[in-house]
Structure formats: C-alpha cells, structure tokens
Image (cartoon, helix red, strand yellow):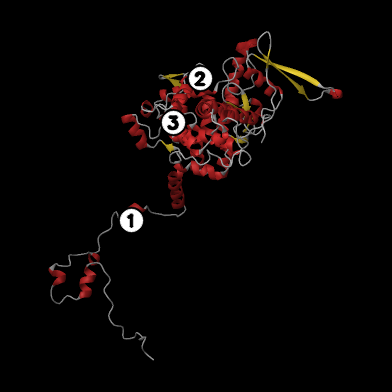
Amino acid sequence: MTKAQTPQPRLLPTGGYVIRYSAPPGPGGRRRQLRVYGGTVKECKDAYTAAMGDPGAARTDARTKLGVYLDQRVAQWALEDDINTRTIDGYRQTFDLYFKPALGHVRLCDLEPKHFRDFAAALRKINRPEADDDKSDLLRRLLAARAQRDGKRISTRPLTDGRIRRVLAVASSALNDLVPEVLPVNPAGKVKVGKVRKQRPLVWTDARVQRWQQTGAVPVQRRQLMVWTAAQAGAFLDSLHTERGRIKPERCYAIFHLAVFSGMRRSELAGLEWADCDLASRRIHVRHAQVERELDTTKSEDSERIIVIDAGTAEVLKAWRKQQLAERLAWGAAWTDSGRVFTREDGSPLCSTWISNRFLTLAERAGLPPVSLHSLRHGAATMQLAAGVPAKVVSENLGHATVAFTMDVYTSVVDQLREDAAERTAALVPLKSKITSLWANSEPNPALTIKNARSPEISGTGVSASQRAEARGFEPRMGANPNRISSAAP
C-alpha cells in the first residue's frame, strides 16, 4: 500500500505549527480551507488526523513503525461499535506499557518472530531476580515504562504466563489485519509462552479450611478461584447482621445477598438500576455495567440477560428500597437521583472497587476462608448446579456464551453432583429394613464355616476331595451324570 500524503506542519512566526488542508465541500458545493494548530510538529499532525475524522486515513505500508501502526489500529477499534470502551482502554494501555517501549521503533517489514520471543522472555523477567542479571536494552525500556504511569507506580508483581499470552494476543490481533497485503505472515502469531493450564474454581472443603487455619495457605494464588460452600456463604450473610457481638445490620447487605444468589458481576451490581428491576414478577434485566464511575454496556452481548430471583431475594430488595427512600427523605434536596439500586447515603452510585474492598473487610471479620467478591459468582453457579438446575439455565443466568463453557469452568462441583445423584438414585428403591442391620443378629452357619484345609478334620484318610472343598466354602464338584447325553452319541 502507498502511504497517504499528509500535509506538513508549517512553523508560525509566533511559535507553534499549523496545517492547512482542504475539507470536503460544504453546503452548495463551496470549497473549504481549514487549519489545525499544535505546539509541536507531532501535536499538529495529531490534530490534523483527528480533524479528518478517520484515524486510519494514513495508510499503512511495510515501512510504518510498529508504534505508529498500533496507535492507528487502536483508534480504528475505538470507532467500531462491537468493542467495549473498557476493552479499548485495555488495548491502549497494553500498547503504551509494553509494545511501544519495547518494539515501537521497529518497522513492520523488519518484524520477525524472534522479536516477540525476546519480548516475551523479557516480560517474564520483570519483577523477578533474573532481571538483575539481564542488562539488555529491551528489558531496560520495559522497566522504564513500568516505573510510573499517570503518577502512580505500576504493580511490582511478576507477570504470569497467562498475562503475557494475553498481551501477545492483542498485538497478534492487530497484526493479523496486515496479512497478506502488508505482511506475508503474522510475526507474533505463533509465539508460545509456557504451558496453557486452565485454572478452575476450587471449593473450600473442610480439609482445605483446616489446612488454611493451621498454616494460612490458600490452594491457589488467585482468590477469585476459591469458592465458598453453601454453608459458608450462609454464614457470611448471617454475620452481616451483627458486629462484635452486637446487633448492627450491614447497610449494604442487599448487594451481597444478591451477589450470592444471582451470580451477577461486580460491575453489573454497581450499574443496576431500579428501572430494570421488577420485584413483583421477580425479574432483573441486566443491561448496564459500571467498572469505575461511568455507566457502560455489559461485558458482551450474552451478558445482557434477564435473571429470575427467588422470593426471599425479592423481599430483601424491597426492604432495601424502603431504606433507600428513608435516606432520600433525610438528605432532602442534596439527594442525588442516580436511579441506581445500590448507592451511597446521598444517592450517588457506588464505586466497583469500594464494593470489593467492603466485601473483603466483612469476609475477614466473619472469620471465613479468603475469597474475592467475584468468587460469589462462582459460588452461585456451584450451588445452582448442585441443586439440580439445568446447565442451560445456569449458563443463561450467568450470561455465558455457551453451556459448554459453563460446564468446563465449573467442574469443581462434579463430585458433589455425583454424590447427590447416587443418593437420589438409592432413594428410588424402597427398603423396609436398613442394610446395616441385616447381619447384626445373624448366627454363622457351621456348614459354611471355612476351616483350615490342613486340619485333621478334613485332611485325614477317608475324607473325599468334595468334602474338603465344601469345608473350605466351595461347591463340591458334581460326579458323572448317567442321564447326561454325550456329545459323541450318534
């Protein structure tokens, strides 16, 4: 492809730069000459690109540098309706934090799989002891980019293989659009990082709880993969009615109750509006999500769904609505009518991060094994499957794309389901007496008592082989039957 001609910025006598360009004809077909300004050449070019309305107007050829192309591609993604704004922000952060510092200066035609293999190896060394011995410029640039972002220090934890694979997947997706017109193959397409191992939720069984109480050890590093049992979830909800032995109901009890029984995501709980709740019919329409403070669409198209709640949960939400109305009267004109179900005392929406932090505080106060707020979603799926709810219904309640994904993730309940199936199968067979009492008062049969084959009673002369076999509990061998028809008879 040929690179589109971009007007060059012109230095102004007063300082700064300007680009003059011809815009599409206005009403009546009149020609329009417009200008954009910038303090630097780059700012002026960026202003021109934004004014043209097509971030990808400058066509990409093989000589384009990777950093420039990634900026163009993420801008194009931002214009596509099927990509969530939160996802776009994640892509942009990935490019700025990893690819642009490490490989942004390399031309597309010069990219090779080795570049991305070295890139993945450098990522694996970040925040690990191996980084002290690596003096490569690649690692130095990555560490410099991670030192601080928006005035905050980047996480000091090492990157897992799963995180590195997700980082590479973003670049691979962007480069796929260049094959085969600009690049013959995708240089990041076949780079492998570690072994792909699925981590599935684990239930806090009695043995695991006992081990945790003794050593503080958690079976997996990610808390969101640990799931409470139904009894533990119930104990958590019960603990929200008291504090330090005194009756003091938790103000946000309703949000955690709904999370336990519905399996809604944290962002969906924060973005839930009263207009989408029909408590009379016990229906909740999940249409919005709030990650931080802005209301957005749900995670995916399948995440928009209608959930049927139980009668008890409906009563909890009705009681919470009365409490919220009382707070509204108390605040008067200062009340913020956000329309949200879960709010602060002044009516403003709750922040998703605050909900998670509050949950961790309450769970620790209850003395329960550690889980994350997202674990309540896994727990809801586990309890629904264990209760015999069809997998299709569970998948729809959670907003999963397929039933296969639901069953693949929640294999931690297979043993519980098998145990329950065995008990229900046994209950179908009516028995008048208990199996354990059948042999309680029985006397041994002397004829069936197995004796030592070498004892004098059965090993002396005059004792036949059939008698010895019968004494050992075997059926004696039958003798010749005179009435038997020989197979050799004519």
Report helix, strand or loop for mark 2. Answer: loop
Residue in the image at 60% along x and 24% along y = 341
Indicate whether 418 appears above or below 249.
below
Q: Nearer the viewer, mark 3 or mark 1?
A: 3
Quick one: which residue is furthest to the bottom in this view?
490
Q: Which tag is nearer the camera, tag 2 or tag 1?
A: 2
Quarter of image, res 342: top right
* Helix, strand or loop at mark 1: loop
In the image, 67 versus 128, the foreground residue is 67
Residue 225 visible within the image: no
In front of the other: 486 or 112: 112
Report, in whole angstroms, how far the alpha carbon at label 3 lies from the one at label 2: 19 Å
From the viewer's perspective, is 30 left or right of 156? right
Instruction: Name the residue that disc number 2 marks.
Output: 149
- According to the picture, the residue beneath numbered tag 3 turns out to be 122
Amino acid found under the numbered disc labelled 3: Ala
- Mark before the other along the chain sequence, 3 or 2: 3
Task: Tell me the residue that label 1 is attached to.
Answer: 438
> Which one is earlier in the sequence, the residue at label 3 or at label 1?
3
Q: Amino acid at mark 2?
A: Arg
Circle 1: is it few (<14), some (14-19), or many (20+) Cα within 10 Å?
few
Image quadrant containing the C terminus:
bottom left
Residue lying furthest right in this view? 28
| Residue 206 in view of the camera | yes
Q: Quadrant of the N terminus?
A: top right
